[in-house]
Image: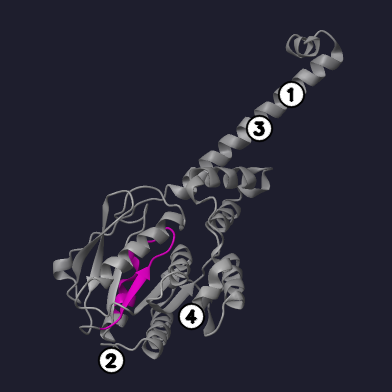
Amino acid sequence: MAVFSELRYPTTRLAKVLSSLLAIILFAFVSIATISGFLLYQILQTPHPTAVVDLNVMMGHPTTMSFPLADGTSRDGWFFPGRRGAPTVVLCHGYLSQRADVMTLVTALQDSQFNVFLFDFSGHGTSPGITSLGYREQQELKSAVQTLSARDDVDPEHFGLWGVDMGGYVALEEASSDPRISALIVDDAYSDPREMVQIQVKQSGLAVLPYVSRFCDWGFRLMNYQFRNEPPVSSRLRYTSGIPKLFIQSDSRPALASETLTLFVLSPEPKQAVRTRTRYSEMTDDDRKNYENIVVSFFLTNMSPTSHH
């Protein structure tokens, strides 16, 4: 007790030095923890630049389709009809994006007679809350596919998935557990939401501060404690054997491109890999057209609307 008393009310030079050092360490710890908490909040509390879209004037004759969520609420998505009884392609937008950002891809797929469905993940577009970078979002996709399969105007046994970064992770999760997924495209995907947190921390420039990366990881794991036993999707890729898969890597996002290459290498056949110069959202009109041709051709080859009834 005398030691603590001496540190609290220092009388010797050594005690004063130790007391000052402890105060500095405590201040540094609190400062780093505060910075990390604010950074994690910035990563997960995504902005909501919601695009205003009037379905009544939109081409493709879309309708709104709702599906239930685990918390008892529901989520609205847009269903674009193709050939009756044809497979449905579900588009899974990425982090800091929304469903309205992939409308040109919808048109390309619908023109090829596919049904197309898209919605906003949590914390994006019109959907409230904060993102979990894939943990809760995989449950949202699973519910959407289940609701779609109950419709009488789609093929209930054949679905295609396209997803970018967060959407790619979610698509891989769904494909590894749902036999109705017949074809899959992932663009700049990752194996674990924790990896995406670290990528965002590094991009912020604050990773140079000691323990910021670790604090952000701890905070993210604590916020998603219910998913603490969720293994990386790379450990379940064997369950996608037989499902045609296309892995797309963009040169403009080297960290995610590296993650995607690893997923490609670990995935069972059949699989393909393609590289692009930049991400889909930043492509020129010509590059985007070429990208959409690759996507549509892949789905037509592996899940043709005219061969499923």
Helix, strand or loop at disc 3? helix
Q: Which mark is residue 178?
A: none
Q: Position of residue 250 (x, y in %)?
A: 53, 73
Helix, strand or loop at disc 1? helix
Q: Residues within 10 Å of mark 4 (few under 14, many from 20)?
A: many
- Discs 1/2, front: 2
The mark nearer the N terminus, 2 or 3, is 3
In the figure, 50 relative to 300: above or below? above
Q: Position of residue 245 (x, y in %)?
A: 48, 80
Q: Which residues are magenta?
A: 86-107
In front of the other: 22 or 86: 86
Helix, strand or loop at disc 2? loop
Disc 3: which residue: 29
In the figure, 81 relative to 37: above or below? below
In front of the other: 285 or 113: 113
Residue 262 visible? The answer is yes
Disc 1: which residue: 22
Q: The disc labelled 4 sits on which kind of residue?
A: Lys
Q: Residues within 10 Å of mark 1 (few under 14, many from 20)?
A: few
- Discs 3/4, front: 4
Disc 2: which residue: 306
Q: The disc labelled 1 sits on which kind of residue?
A: Leu
The mark nearer the N terminus, 3 or 4, is 3
In this rendering, position of residue 132 left or right of residue 231: left
Disc 4: which residue: 245
The residue positioned 75% from the left and 20% from the top of the image is 20
The N terminus, quarter of image: top right
Q: The disc labelled 3 sits on which kind of residue?
A: Phe
Q: CA distance from mark 2 to mark 4?
A: 20 Å
Q: The disc labelled 2 sits on which kind of residue?
A: Thr
